Image: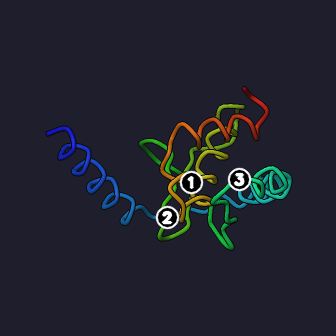
Amino acid sequence: MRGICLFILLLTSNQATASTPCQPLPEIQQRLEQLARGWHSTLALETGYAPPARYTVCQLKSGLPFADHPLKRIYIRGLASENDEITLAHEYLHLAFSHHPRGHYEVFIEAMARRLVGVQ
């Protein structure tokens, strides 16, 4: 039963992301591109890392931050705190590891995001 509930949750969350419009956040996208260049040497050592060729950072109106894999979008509220920076790194990592099982392993993604931002 638990597996069915998780499947339904995953299915409905994917449907919600498909209809989420993107209001680009160019300043945050530029910041992420700068950060990603700095993270590259660390991430290049990780199995499964493939930096996304393109992606868009979008304004999140409600709900939890997420990465939309098919559209290569990251939805976040803003970048006002260290926690927001961890969230941005976290969602970027979901895209960067999207073609590898690690991209779906939340413990790995969160630990790596904290490591990249400098929070252990």
Please, what secondary structure does the residue beneath circle 2 have?
A: loop
Q: Is residue 21 above or below residue 109?
A: below
Q: Label 3 vs label 2: CA separation?
A: 20 Å
At a point 54% along the width and 65% down the height, the residue shown is 99
Q: Position of residue 104 (x, y in %)?
A: 48, 50
Which quadrant holds residue 98?
Answer: bottom right
Contact (CB < 8 A) between labels 3 and 2? no
Residue 67 versus residue 53 in the image, above or below? above
Residue neighbourhood size for the residue with mark 3, other residues' Cα within 10 Å, grouped as few (<14), some (14–19), many (≥20):
few
First in sequence, mark 3 or 1: give its number: 3
> Which marked residue is nearer to the observer: mark 3 or mark 2?
3
Write the residue at 74% across / 54% down.
Answer: 32
Mark 1 is surrounded, within 10 Å at the Cα level, by few (under 14), some (14 to 19) or many (20 or more) other residues, namely many
**Tag 3: residue type?**
Glu
SS for dot 1: helix
Gap between marks 3 and 1 measured at Cα:
13 Å
Contact (Cβ within 8 Å) of mark 1 with mark 2: yes
- Of 116 and 102, nearer the camera is 102
* Amino acid type, label 1: His
Residue 19 placement (x, y as % from top left): 36, 65
- In the image, farthest residue toward the top: 120
Give the color scheme: rainbow, by chain, secondary structure or one colour.
Answer: rainbow
Report the residue marked by disc 3. 46
Question: Label 2 is placed on what type of residue?
Answer: His
Tell me the CA gap for discs 1 and 2.
8 Å
Which mark identifies residue 69?
A: 2
Residue at point 72%, 31% (across, down):
82
Q: What residue do we see at 58% from left, 41% from top? A: 108
**Residue that mark 1 sits on:** 94
